Image: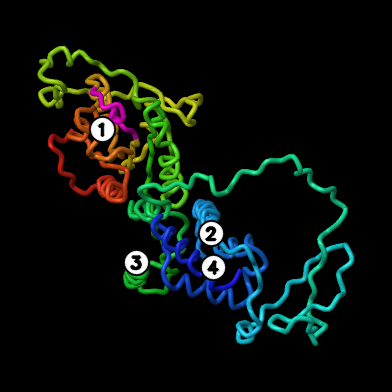
Amino acid sequence: MTAGGALESVRKLWTQLRQRGFELSPTDLDALRLALLAGFGWDSRDSFRELLVALWAKTPREAQALRALFERLNWPEGWTAPTPAVLISAPRVPRLAVVDPQPVDTAPVPTLGAAPGAIAADTKEPRLARVAAGLPPWPTADVRFADARLIDVEMFPLNHREVAQAFRRLRRPARIGPPTELDVDATVAMRSRRGVATPPVMVPRRGNNAHLVVFVDVAAPMRPYKPFVDMVCDAVLQAGLLRRAMRLFFHELPSSVAGRALLDELPVDGFAPVLDPLLARIAPTDSGELYLDEMLEQPVALPELLRSLEPSTAALVISDVDAARGSFDLLRLHDTLAFARALRQHGVSIAWLNPLPRALWARSTAAQLARHVPMYSLDRTGVLRAVNAMRGQPVELERAL
């Protein structure tokens, strides 16, 4: 590879990564230039690719996307080291000694930047060891490796970092843990009251005491969105910096069938009858089961869950609510509102994220549910608004529950 031959491919890769949400700037291009001047990434095409991963990828998902996009670009066939004139002014990179029980190659090591055939004068510099022997060759003659250019690279409406940053705004400041912080005002007040020197007053350090429960719908219409929903949940649970966060699964309804006698009083009017006349009379339901796994094999009783929730807990529900089918289910709307009312009864703030854009909610259960419960599209703006709703900020609804 020559510097001029790969420059265009590097620019294309940098542009594609920025389009996929990578936080890259011209400073990152300069970091790549300095690394190449230092002699990194010239051994092979794979070495250059891993250098890009080390410099530009911040998470395993970003590393996977970068490697896949790298394979799709046209890189030069020849991979040669830079010219000596380029490396004369580059900083010297120390070699690393490899501990190996096998004999070490004692041949002189050429100095970085020296002319071909030149030998380093400093023979005390550590030399690289040969590859360890004794292991049988790996039988890969009949193995068919996948073409990296055909790997499907995910491109979601928002990335892992954006989700994590949004949910870090879900904060309930409180002093948690052992007393390790000095309370100056309390210490001064105690000494002034007693008139003698007293031990300092220590208080716990202030931290985030936010609790979050994520309810994920695993019904058939949600299967196309599973990788996206999994990424969102992983970002919330792993990087959201919440004191307590858990994920539970359900199938279409997060609770069992509630009392539906009220529906007999509802006149059928139009395609999607509204529940406004009966909204205040919908009783909360705490019956049913949720599950700890996606296969719905480890049940958790809903009454037990509600009793374990502390006040000011936030609840996030991720479901399409019939928007993927474009259908309306009056019974599902009724039972979902009964479940939401049960959460509200236990002091839980609730928000809903729908993987489908709002334009596709029309004439579906989701459109009616969004009139009573804060529901947003699963994109950057929707996630920020959902976090604001769970923080207790006022939400404009057509007919609040």
Residue at image position (47%, 25%) is: 296
The amino acid beneath tag 1 is Gln
Q: Residues within 10 Å of mark 1 (few under 14, many from 20)?
A: few
Tell whether 205 sits left or right of 392. Answer: right
Disc marking residue 345: 1
- Is 272 a magenta residue? no
Residues packed near mark 2 inside 10 Å, few (<14), some (14 to 19) or many (20 plus): few
Task: Identify the secondary structure beneath mark 3.
Answer: helix
List the residue tagged with mark 4: 6
Q: Decide: is 149 above or below 297.
A: below
Identity of the amino acid at label 3? Answer: Ala
Question: SS of the residue at dot 2?
Answer: loop
Earlier in the chain: of badge 1 and badge 2, it is 2
Residue located 35% across and 74% down the image: 195
Magenta highlight: main SS:
loop
Asked whether the beta carbons under mark 3 and mark 2 sit within 8 Å of each other, the answer is no
Residue, disc 2: 74
**Earlier-in-chain disc, 3 versus 1:** 3
Q: Quadrant of residue 99?
A: bottom right
Q: Nearer the viewer, mark 3 or mark 1?
A: 1
Decide: is 43 above or below 64.
below
Badge 2 amino acid = Asn
Q: CA distance from mark 4 to mark 1?
A: 62 Å
Q: Which residue is mark 3?
A: 186
In the image, residue 90 lies at what x, y percent? Answer: 61, 83
Crowd tier of the residue under label 4, counting other residues whose Cα lies within 10 Å: few below 14, some 14–19, many 20 or above: some
Whichever of callouts 2 and 4 sits on the residue coming sooner in the sequence is 4
